[in-house]
Image (spheres, grey):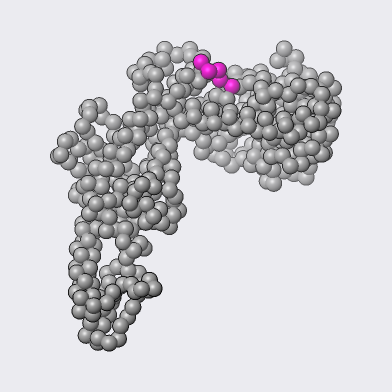
Amino acid sequence: MATLFTLTFWKWLFDQGVVSGKTPVKPGIVPEGLGLVAQRDIARNEAVLEVPKRFWINPDAVAASEIGSVCGGLKPWVSVALFLIREKLRDESPWRSYLDILPEYTNSTIYWSEEELVEIQGTQLSNTTLGVKEYVQSEFLKVEEEVILPHSQLFPFPVTLDDFLWAFGILRSRAFSRLRGQNLVLIPLADLINHSPSITTEEYAWEIKGAELVKRELPQHPRICNWGLVLIQYDLDKSNAELALDYGFIESRPNRNSYTLTLEISESDPFFGDKLDIAESNGLSEIAYFDIVLGQSLPAAMLPYLRLVALGGPDAFLLESIFRNTIWGHLELPVSRANEELICQVIQDACKSALSGYLTTIEEDEKLKEEGNLHPRLEIAVGVRTGRRRCCNKLMGFSGKGKGNWISWNITKKGGLRTSACVGSKVKSSFGSPSKKPQFLFSIYLTFRTLANFIKCQRRIPLWSSQNGEREEPEDNPKSSGFASCYCYLLKQIVPGGAA
């Protein structure tokens, strides 16, 4: 049946003038399903295919269609989804030949059954999948109430949530989103080009030339031989979890595996306001997300943010306003032994919580992979589980030494990762003792606070505030005023902006 639909689709393209006998590629049955296969040798930088804009399915095509008048206020993807569903359910759709080659489902996790979703229980992919399905359902209920039911003459057939989920999955896996001026477009024939993990560039060889989409081979790509597959790289930045959600496959490359560490400044923290102000001043917020990727260094802002969240006790002096302009630099180095122990505990607790949700052990998953012949969806589940475990193990410095160990982290000059194992109260540090800079600043801070108190006693007036909340500079005591001037001068030299 697939072969028949493919032949019918090719004939339709030929009759419409999209392809000709000189077109170097045509649809073919490939391991992934359908793909583009070369009919002859294709030279480098030669145009592979050209698709006129009149065959593009995008919001402009929807606006020009019979349902355009009722789709004006919808999200672009919702309007295109409605267009696809309507054309699929119509008996005499001009897009019938194209719609018949589209799959009813993919291995994307949005199509998995409840039993299959159990296989990714405990992963962030599971939560994301459920969230996406809830989002699609809410959008469907909204468009059903506002568009489908009130305009039964345009939708004389039942439209179900399954139809809407199908259209969402088609757009998620096949739509182009990187063409100049085109945020969402489905292009028949061009969307048959499959993904290759061996292609490691995101330089897309697509051009918009006049009213056509032109696909050219990049100069650095090898020449495509007769019967060879035409392939591209879908997205280098997506993790395996994102690839599984969008397309229904994963890769074996380590850097496709990631774990998102979520950190938060608690509202119950007595220094919540100060910490939030510092975080926002450095491009972060009350909640921060950090992607831990295998084979890559830790996110640059993760450790400073962790140390900020953990600041308290004797270390809280760094939250004083005189250090506001320099505190982030201090947080890039260990603040104190207690602070480092606390952030290590936070990391371990988060990773242990993440690892506790799995129904299988890492040994069981490794055995499944060794046995092979897994169903594609089970292969995805096992790959996502093991990849996330490895990320958590990297973050924890997992060594199998049992409970009571904690890991202290530091970023090397090369941006790599070093760890130091701490057993009980003994620390074996690979980066030396905590920075002496905060201790030095603390000594200065205490010295000047003592000096400030002395000046206050001499003058019997507040040095830093007055009844209206502003700093007073008295002139009736030249001697004490001199002390204040000296204090502010020294503070400016040692802590830039501290006495501003």
**Residue 112 image position (x, y, % from top left):** 56, 20
Q: Residue at x 66, y 22 (%)?
A: 162
Q: Is residue 455 left or right of residue 393?
A: left
Q: Is residue 163 left or right of residue 416?
A: right
Q: Residue at x 68, y 33 (%)?
A: 142
Q: Residue at x 51, y 31 (%)?
A: 128
Q: Residue furthest front?
A: 467
Q: Residue furthest left?
A: 426
Q: Residue at x 36, y 47 (%)?
A: 268
| Residues in magenta, as a range | 111-115
**Residue 37 image position (x, y, % from top left):** 67, 24
**Residue 247 image position (x, y, % from top left):** 58, 28
Residue 180 visible at all: yes
Is 433 or 312 nearer to us in this picture?
A: 312
Q: Is residue 137 magenta?
A: no
Prevailing SS of the magenta stretch: helix
Q: Is residue 489 left or right of residue 277?
A: left
Q: Quadrant of the N terminus?
A: top right
Q: Is residue 171 above or below residue 287?
A: above
| Numbered marks: total | 0
Residue 402: name its quadrant: top left
Q: Quadrant of the C terminus?
A: bottom left
Q: Is residue 314 above or below residue 419?
A: below
Q: Is residue 293 above or below residue 496?
A: above
